[in-house]
Image: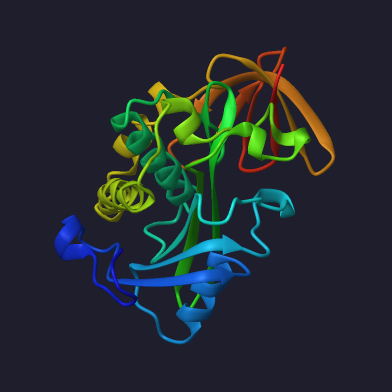
């Protein structure tokens, strides 16, 4: 394991991500710590990891449950690349999916930030910020474990990479693979090539062309998901043929 404060970029070949690695045994949240570090002057590209989170969070205020020492819990600090912050969380989800695919998995992406395997959630992304001009992009991946290790109410909805691949995984190696792929996508966003990056999501999109229900601010919208838009939002076409562009909410397959 690299020492605390290590610059990972020479080993990874990354341009921005990995300028400094900050590691903890336990944190309230890697996102919150990354934002605190940003206020204290941390550089863009800083990576914060933890063995466990005491108050890990997902979207919509939900709690993120981890198994200590068996999940990849990581946050990267970056400068928002353009006027579409949704692209950054999409790029992080894409990086996780591409990394899993290189290991032999068959990942799917569920808008806006979930990574699934076999219809069960394997990873999630949470973008927050900004402080000191930086945004925290948190990534949580269930790496080594089994659905049976989770509370009963989650066993049919979540899984672990080792369970799906039938072998244990090196979390540091997975971290490095994700950072390399996210750095590539981030560089594309910085160069104004966001549309091409967003097109790479299409093969993984598990909602595209399917009927969904979206709950936004207490309002339910039903229709066919037409896929990620280039700004990171999603388009839904209702039964009357009207298109609705949504940038957040809870989506369910029908």
Residue drawn at x 24%, y 71% is: 7
Position of 102 with respect to 34 (left or right) is left
Q: Nearer the viewer, residue 25 or 179?
A: 25
- 200 in relation to 4, above or below: above
Quadrant in the picture for the C terminus: top right
Residue 230 occupies which quadrant of the picture? top left
x and y percentages locating residue 147 in the rendered image: 62, 33
x and y percentages locating residue 76 in the rendered image: 41, 63
Residue 217 occupies which quadrant of the picture? top right
Quadrant in the picture for the N terminus: bottom left
Residue drawn at x 39%, y 26% is: 105
Position of 78 with respect to 137 (left or right) is left
- 70 in relation to 250, above or below: below
x and y percentages locating residue 121 in the rendered image: 58, 33
Q: Residue furthest right?
A: 218
Residue drawn at x 46%, y 78% is: 38
- 191 in relation to 239, above or below: below
């Amino acid at each position: 394991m690299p020492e605390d404060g290590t610059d990972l970029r020479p080993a990874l070949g990354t341009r921005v991500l990995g300028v400094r690695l900050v590691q903890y045994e336990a944190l309230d949240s890697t996102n919150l710590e990354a934002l605190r570090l940003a206020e204290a002057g941390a550089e863009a590209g800083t990576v914060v990891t933890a063995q466990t989170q005491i108050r890990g969070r997902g979207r919509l205020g939900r709690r993120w449950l981890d198994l200590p020492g068996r999940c990849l819990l990581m946050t990267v600090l970056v400068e928002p690349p353009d006027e579409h912050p949704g692209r950054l969380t999409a790029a992080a989800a894409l990086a996780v999916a591409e990394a899993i695919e290189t290991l032999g998995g068959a990942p799917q992406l569920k808008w806006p930030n979930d990574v699934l395997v076999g219809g069960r959630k394997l990873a999630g992304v949470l973008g927050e910020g900004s402080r000191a001009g930086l945004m925290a992009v948190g990534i949580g991946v269930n790496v080594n474990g089994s659905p049976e290790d989770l509370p009963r109410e989650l066993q049919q909805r979540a899984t672990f990479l080792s369970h799906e691949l039938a072998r244990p995984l090196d979390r540091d190696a997975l971290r490095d693979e994700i950072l390399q792929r996210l750095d590539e996508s981030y560089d594309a966003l910085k160069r104004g090539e966001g549309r091409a990056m967003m097109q790479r999501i299409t093969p993984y999109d598990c909602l595209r062309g399917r009927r969904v229900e979206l709950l936004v601010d207490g309002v339910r919208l039903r229709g066919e998901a037409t896929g990620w838009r280039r700004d990171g939002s999603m388009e839904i076409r209702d039964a009357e043929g009207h298109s609705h562009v949504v940038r957040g909410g809870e989506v369910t397959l029908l």
